[in-house]
Image (tube, coloured by chain):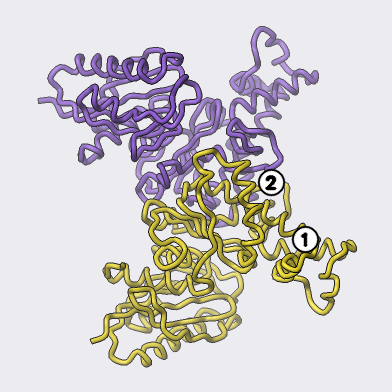
Chain colours: A purple, B yellow
Amino acid sequence: MTAPQVIAVDLGGTSLRATLAGPDGRLGQIRRIRTDARGGPDKVVAQIVELVADVRAAAGSTPILGIGLSSTGPLDPFTGTVFTLPTLDGWNNVPLRDLVAERTGLPVTLENDAISAAVGEWRFGAGRGVQSLAYVTVSTGIGGGVIVDGRIMHGRMGMAGHVGHMTLLPDGPRCGCGNHGCWEALASGTALGRIVRERLAAGAASSMQSITDRPVTAEDVALAARAGDPLGTEILAGEARWLGIGVVSLLHLFSPERVIMGGGVSSALDLMAGGIAAEIQARAMAPFRAVPVVPAALGGDAGLAGAATLAFAAAGTKLP
Amino acid sequence: MTAPQVIAVDLGGTSLRATLAGPDGRLGQIRRIRTDARGGPDKVVAQIVELVADVRAAAGSTPILGIGLSSTGPLDPFTGTVFTLPTLDGWNNVPLRDLVAERTGLPVTLENDAISAAVGEWRFGAGRGVQSLAYVTVSTGIGGGVIVDGRIMHGRMGMAGHVGHMTLLPDGPRCGCGNHGCWEALASGTALGRIVRERLAAGAASSMQSITDRPVTAEDVALAARAGDPLGTEILAGEARWLGIGVVSLLHLFSPERVIMGGGVSSALDLMAGGIAAEIQARAMAPFRAVPVVPAALGGDAGLAGAATLAFAAAGTKLP
C-alpha cells in the first residue's frame, strides 16, 4: 500500500493550484487553473472542490489524510474564516475551511499563504533544522511568517507576522493598508517599480529608457543592474538599504536563527546581499549580527509544501 | 505544613531585591540593597547569595522550591549566561544562573527583566486571561517582552522581544544601541527629557522654566501637562504619537490580544491614551484596531512576580 498522502491547495488572487503531497515534502504534479476572481466565494469553492476531485482521482487508491489549504488573506486559521480577499470579489467573512471540508468530506487545514510558505521553507527549504526563523516575501507587497521556538507564531486571530506593515518611516509614502511608511510601501516590488518610473520620467540616464511599451518593473531594474546600468545599480542599492533596515527590526523583535527572503524582488538578493549586510552591521545590536540572511529555496511551491505539512500535522503524522 | 514557596530575585543596575513568593503571585516582604555596581560579578553574586540566605532564614521551615532570578541583560536564559550588564562593571559572559545555583544549592531560573515583568503581568496583572500580549516598559529606555500563543517568545539565545530597538525613523536620533531612530531613541523617558530640555533652552514658555536646579525629566513633563502647561501638553502629545506608531507595529507583528504599557513614562498613559488611540485608528489594519492598550498593574514588582512564576514552572508546579 502506498503511504498516505495529503492534498495541498494554494488559493491566490490570480491562480488556484493543487497537488498531491507526501510526508517528505515531495509534491506531485501541480494542477493550476485561473481563479474565478469575479465569481464570488461559491464559484471559487466549486473550483477548489473540482481541483481536489481531480487530484484525488489521479491518486487512485492512495489514502488521503486531508487537505492543506493555503490562501491569500487576511484570514483566521483557528476559525477557518477568510475575512476578505482584496483581489477577489464578494469575499466577506467566508467560512472557507468548513465549506471545503463539507463538500470534499476531508478534514481541511487553512493557513495564510505567507505563513504556509514560511512553514514550507522551515520543513523542506532554506529553514531546515532551525527552531526560529523569519520568512519574508518581497513581491507586489511584503508578506511574511515567523517561526519561533519551534512553533508558528499565530497570535490573536492568527494574524501575527504581518512584517510588511511595520512602520519604518511614519511620514513616508502611503501604503495599500492605509498607513504611511510601512516596509511594504517602501521596499515592495510595487514601490521599486514606482521609484524607477519616477526617475526615468525625470530623465535619468539608463538602458531602461528603452522600455516604452509597458511599465518598467522591479525585474527590469534587476536585469539592468546585472548588466551594469548605473540607475539600476543605484535603485537596487536603495532597495537593499530598506530591506536591511527592516531585517534589523526583525532580528531585534523575533531573534530568528535565520532570515529567509523570498518573492520576486528577492531574486536579486545576490546583488543586494552586501547592502543588506552593511545595514545589519551598522544597526543591529552585537548579538544579532551573526544571523544569516538567505534566499528562499522552494520558490512558488513553498506555500504548497507548507500547506501539506500542516495537513499532515493535523492528521497527527510525525514529519521527518 | 506551609505550601512550598520560591525566592524571587531582581538584579538591577542600581538595586538588588529579593523576596519569598507563593504560587498565587503573592510576594512577601521585599528586601532591597544597593547593587555593588563597581564590584564585578563576584561581589554581586555574593550579594545575591547573602540576600537569598536572609529570605530563606526568615522563611523558617517553609519548603523552598528554587530561585527565580530576573536580571537586566542582555542575557541568554537557556544557558543562564549574562552577556554584559551595561550599568555594571566587569560583566562579560558570566554564568550567573549556575554561580547562584552552586552557592545556594537551589535550582535557579534566569530570565531578563523585561520578559520577567511581562510574565508577571500576564499571570497576575494586566494580562490575566489572555494567550498573547505585548508588554512594553517605557522608562530610561524602552524594553519589552512578548507572550504569544500561551508561551514566552524567546527566539535565538532568548533574545526576542527587544521592542525598543525596532527602527521607526532610520535617519532619526542615535540610539544607545548604536542604531538610529529606534523606538527607544524617539520615545523613552531619556528622549522625552532631551526634547523638553531642548525646547526650554530655545526659550519656550512653560512653567518648567522654573526648574533650574536639576535637569528637567519626563516626570516633570507629565506634572506640567496635568497642570495645563501648554509645552508639557504639546510634548506629551508628541510622545503619544511615537508610542502609538510603535504600538501599531507591535499589533501588526505580534497580533497580541492586549498591549500592556509599564515604566515611568507610562504613568502619564491616561494623558496619552487619546493620542495613542488616534494613531492606532489611523495606521492599524482594521482587524487590529480593537486591541486594547492598558496600563501595567504591578508596577516595579512585575519582574519579581514573573521570576517567581518561572521558578514555580521550572519546579513543575501548576499555577492558577
Chain of the residue under the numbered disc 1 shown in the image: B
> According to the image, label 2 marks what residue?
B170
Asked whether residue B12 is in view, the answer is yes
Residue at 31 percent of width and 67 percent of height: B320
Residue at 41 percent of width and 34 percent of height: A75
Residue at 27 percent of width and 81 percent of height: B3
Mark 1 Cα shell of 10 Å, populated few (<14), some (14-19), many (≥20): many
To which quarter of the image does residue A100 belong?
Answer: top left
Q: Position of residue A164 (x, y in %)?
A: 55, 37
Asked whether residue A274 is in view, the answer is no
B105 left or right, relative to A167: left
A179 left or right, relative to B112: right
The quarter in which the C terminus of chain A is drawn is top left
Instruction: Please tell me whether residue A60 is drawn above or below residue B205 in the rendered image.
Output: above
Which mark, residue B195?
A: 1
B220 left or right, relative to B198: left
In the rendered structure, which disc, 2 or 1, sits on the residue that comes first in sequence?
Answer: 2
Q: Position of residue B50 (x, y in %)?
A: 44, 89
Instruction: Please tell me whether residue A3 is drawn above or below residue A151 in the rendered image.
Output: above
